[in-house]
Image: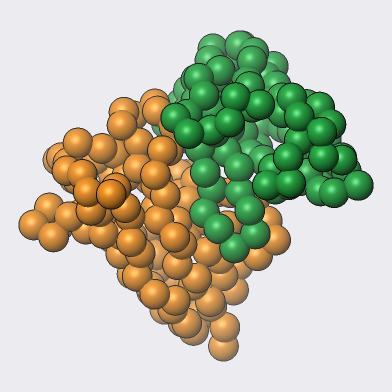
């Protein structure tokens, strides 16, 4: 069945970087856009950015410009999200979600990856 | 960026109640409005896309309406499994934004 499976929980110190992966199965990665959304503990959903796995083009939320990089490896059907210069406020659950088209809803989500930032 | 607001932020209801949640966009988003349900410890689940299109497998007790700036999610008869947090989301612009959420809990 269609699935997005994310990598496991991470713990980082302030100033470090983290790389979270999202592996697609049950469908062709390049036929859907892939978004990243995060959720701080007890908070709402915050959109971070989008990657088109077909050509690797990206668009990021202004808040994360310069700190986030999204890439893909079509040979393994995996998308990656790297967030750098981590601070305590980046502690959150990070989700990937796919969308059929650029302006479409996110119809399948990964299970989430907890990233904790603490000294 | 387009700002999304929801009301109420939380509500208490009983099984069988009719529940309505409102979402408002800071500018016209036509029908580029989606609704998600999230339960504790779980990823969001898409309920309704394009303001009123029910996703496959979602009970018909859920419905969505609206266009422009004002939208509603209605649950016609609340079931025990419907107690959750509901988020709206605009996909009109590529700086996608979510509403702050509405938590529906048991009265």
The chain painted green is B
What scheme was used to colour the molecule? by chain
Asked which quadrant contains residue A68, the reply is bottom left
From this viewpoint, which residue is outermost toward the left?
A75
Residue B19 position, x and y percent, is 79, 29
State the residue in front, B28 or A6.
A6
| Chain A, chosen colour in render | orange
At 56% from the left edge and 19% from the top edge, which residue is drawn?
A: B51
At 33% from the left edge and 61% from the top edge, which residue is drawn?
A: A5
Please indicate, yes or no, whether residue A115 appears anywhere in the rendered image: yes
Residue B36 position, x and y percent, is 57, 38
Please indicate, yes or no, whether residue A70 appears anywhere in the rendered image: no
From this viewpoint, which residue is outermost toward the right?
B107
Q: Looking at the image, is A47 positioned above or below residue A115?
A: above
State the residue in front, B14 or B72.
B14
Please state if A26 lies on the left or on the right of B83 as rendered: left
Please state if B72 lies on the left or on the right of B13 as rendered: left
State the residue in front, A107 or A64.
A107
State the residue in front, B79 or B11.
B79
At 84% from the left edge and 31% from the top edge, which residue is drawn?
A: B17
Asked which quadrant contains residue A95, the reply is bottom left
At 63% from the left edge and 39% from the top edge, which residue is drawn?
A: B87
Q: Quadrant of the N terminus of chain B?
A: top right
Q: Looking at the image, is B99 positioned above or below residue B23?
A: below
Q: Looking at the image, is B48 positioned above or below residue B13?
A: above
Residue B50 position, x and y percent, is 49, 20
């Amino acid at each position: 069945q269609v699935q997005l499976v994310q990598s496991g929980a991470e713990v980082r110190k302030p100033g470090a970087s983290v790389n979270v992966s999202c592996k697609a199965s049950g469908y062709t990665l390049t036929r859907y856009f892939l978004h990243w959304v995060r959720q701080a503990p007890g908070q709402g959903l915050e959109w971070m950015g989008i990657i088109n796995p077909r050509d690797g083009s990206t668009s990021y939320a202004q808040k994360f410009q310069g700190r986030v990089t999204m890439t893909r490896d079509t040979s393994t059907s995996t998308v990656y999200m790297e967030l750098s210069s981590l601070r305590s406020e980046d502690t959150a659950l990070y989700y990937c979600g796919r969308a059929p088209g650029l302006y479409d809803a996110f119809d399948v989500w990964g299970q989430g990856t907890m990233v904790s930032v603490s000294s | 960026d387009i700002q999304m607001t929801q009301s109420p932020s939380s509500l208490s209801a009983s099984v069988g109640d009719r529940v309505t949640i409102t979402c408002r966009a800071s500018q016209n988003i036509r029908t580029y409005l989606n609704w998600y349900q999230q339960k504790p410890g779980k990823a969001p689940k898409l309920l309704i896309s394009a303001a009123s299109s029910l996703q496959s497998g979602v009970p018909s007790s859920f419905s969505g309406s609206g266009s422009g700036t004002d939208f509603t999610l209605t649950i016609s008869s609340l079931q025990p499994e419907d107690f959750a947090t509901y988020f709206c989301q605009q996909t009109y612009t590529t700086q996608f934004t979510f509403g702050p959420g509405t938590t529906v809990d048991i009265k």
